[in-house]
Amino acid sequence: MKTVQISLNSIDKVKAFVNDVTKFNTDFDLVSGRYVIDAKSIMGIFSLDLSKPIDLNIHDDDDIDEILGILDPYIVK
């Protein structure tokens, strides 16, 4: 499992993010405080506080480089 911080500070970013993560057959969790949301759930994402960065847990070690490459626009550097 790998954890990165992402920023989803607009509706368009959320839509694009969900489209990107659904391409993979792996589990993604968004963690904000004590809440853990399935990152493939657009309604779940909108229930979080999107004004600050959120932790993304990626439950895949095989395709991690490809996943990080596609999710690069959302990762907080």
Image (spheres, grey):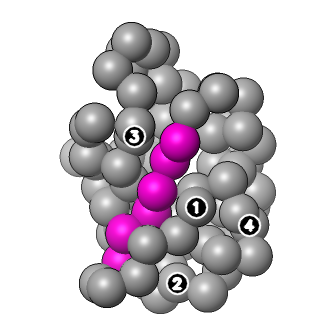
- Gap in angstroms between the C-alphas marked 3 and 1: 11 Å
Q: Which residues are magenta?
A: 27-32
Residue 72, quarter of the rendered image: top left
- Gap in angstroms between the C-alphas marked 2 and 1: 11 Å
**Earlier-in-chain disc, 2 versus 3:** 2
In this view, the residue in front, 66 or 41, is 41
Pointers 2 and 4 in contact (C-beta within 8 Å): no
Label 4 environment density (alpha carbons within 10 Å; few <14, some 14–19, many ≥20): some
- Gap in angstroms between the C-alphas marked 2 and 4: 10 Å
Residue 44, quarter of the rendered image: bottom right
Mark 4 sits on what residue?
42
- Gap in angstroms between the C-alphas marked 4 and 3: 17 Å
Residue 25, quarter of the rendered image: top right
Q: Label for residue 48?
A: 2
- Gap in angstroms between the C-alphas marked 2 and 3: 18 Å
Pointers 4 and 3 in contact (C-beta within 8 Å): no
Mark 3 sits on what residue?
58
